[in-house]
Image: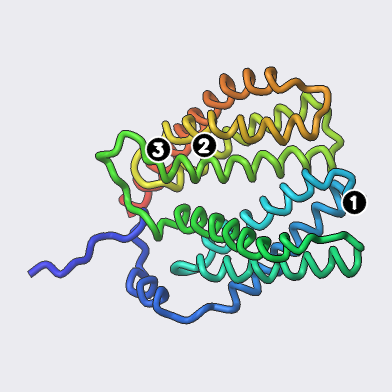
Amino acid sequence: MDTQHPPAGRDNPPDVEETTEDQDEPLRWAWVGAGVLLGAVLISLFVYLVDPTLENPTAAGAIAVLSIILVGILVGYRSHGETIRETAVAGIVLFVLLAIVGAGILDISIAALTWLIGPFFVAGMAMLGGWVGEMLQGTLEEAYDDRAVDWPWVFVSVIIGVTLSAYAVFLGRALFDLTTVQSLLVFAASFLVTGWIVGFSSPGVTMVEPAIAAGMLIIIDAGFIILWFDDLAASQTLLIGFGGGMVLALLGGWLGETHQRARDRKRAAK
């Protein structure tokens, strides 16, 4: 009798049983600590490089949230098994540390409502990033060929795209003093890279999903661009984004799928 188990995840990793057992294990504090350390570094670098005087608190707060999402993505992707709980705990610890530093050292007034809602919001953002990381790792979903559009991967594309484009533009301007046109080129390249990541990492064929996500993405990212670049009109941003962004995301998805197939053929030949 055939006792072979079906593959788990997109790459059928050899440690399927170990992954299943990990789900029943207690909280892995090493990954909590890694998330807190990584988040503190990312947020500190942003404050030091991009907005050292915190003149734009809205943009600073947005990047802090994206940093927490990025922490969740990295922890979820790099860890064995599911570590979404660990990202939530790391997010709460990060919020407490940031609030203490902001109120005690930077003398920033923090409302009581922020203290009440903040930990839950930050934990939710960290878990969202952790979910994306687990999707990229292949521990949460197998391919579903009967679906015209794989909507979970659309949302994965949106989250990765927003985080990647914001970091690329903000850090690019801080480190290389990019002009508005150069920043837009970097912003456009983030759509291509997002499409490649999703196309390469996702099971099945997911070329359309990054393109659909690009339409959602541009509306969100337009807010960042308009907030940061006073000389760029919202209508121009949306027109450029909907056209070029969807094409670039589709191209990136195709490149990712091509790379994925080439990798699979190479593994099958061994």
Question: Of callouts 1 and 3, which one flags the residue occurring earlier in the amino acid sequence?
Answer: 1
* Structural crowding at the residue carrying mark 1, measured as other residues with C-alpha within 10 Å and reported as few (<14), some (14–19) or many (≥20): few
Question: Which residue is at the front of the view, 244 or 257?
Answer: 244
Q: Residue at x 80, y 26 (%)?
A: 180
Question: Of callouts 2 and 1, which one flags the residue occurring earlier in the amino acid sequence?
Answer: 1
CB contact under 8 Å: marks 1 and 3: no
User: Quadrant of the rendered structure where residue 18 is?
Assistant: bottom left
Question: Is 166 displayed left or right of 83 in the figure?
Answer: right
Which label sits on residue 206?
3
Question: Is 122 displayed left or right of 10 in the figure?
Answer: right
Q: Secondary structure at mark 2?
A: helix
Q: Secondary structure at mark 3?
A: loop
Q: Secondary structure at mark 1?
A: loop
The quarter of the rendered structure image containing the C terminus is bottom left
Residue that label 2 marks: 195
Where does the image place residue 34, in percent across and percent down from the top left?
65, 70
Question: Of callouts 3 and 2, which one flags the residue occurring earlier in the amino acid sequence?
Answer: 2
Which label sits on residue 52?
1
Q: CA distance from mark 3 to mark 2?
A: 9 Å
Q: Residue at x 44, y 35 (%)?
A: 209
Question: Which residue is at the front of the view, 270 or 72?
Answer: 72
Q: Residue at x 65, y 68 (%)?
A: 92
Question: Is 181 displayed left or right of 235 in the figure?
Answer: right
Which label sits on residue 256?
none
* Structural crowding at the residue carrying mark 2, measured as other residues with C-alpha within 10 Å and reported as few (<14), some (14–19) or many (≥20): many
CB contact under 8 Å: marks 2 and 1: no
What amino acid type is highlighted by mark number 1?
A: Pro
What amino acid type is highlighted by mark number 2?
A: Gly
The quarter of the rendered structure image containing the N terminus is bottom left
Colour scheme of the rendered structure: rainbow
Q: CA distance from mark 2 to mark 1?
A: 32 Å
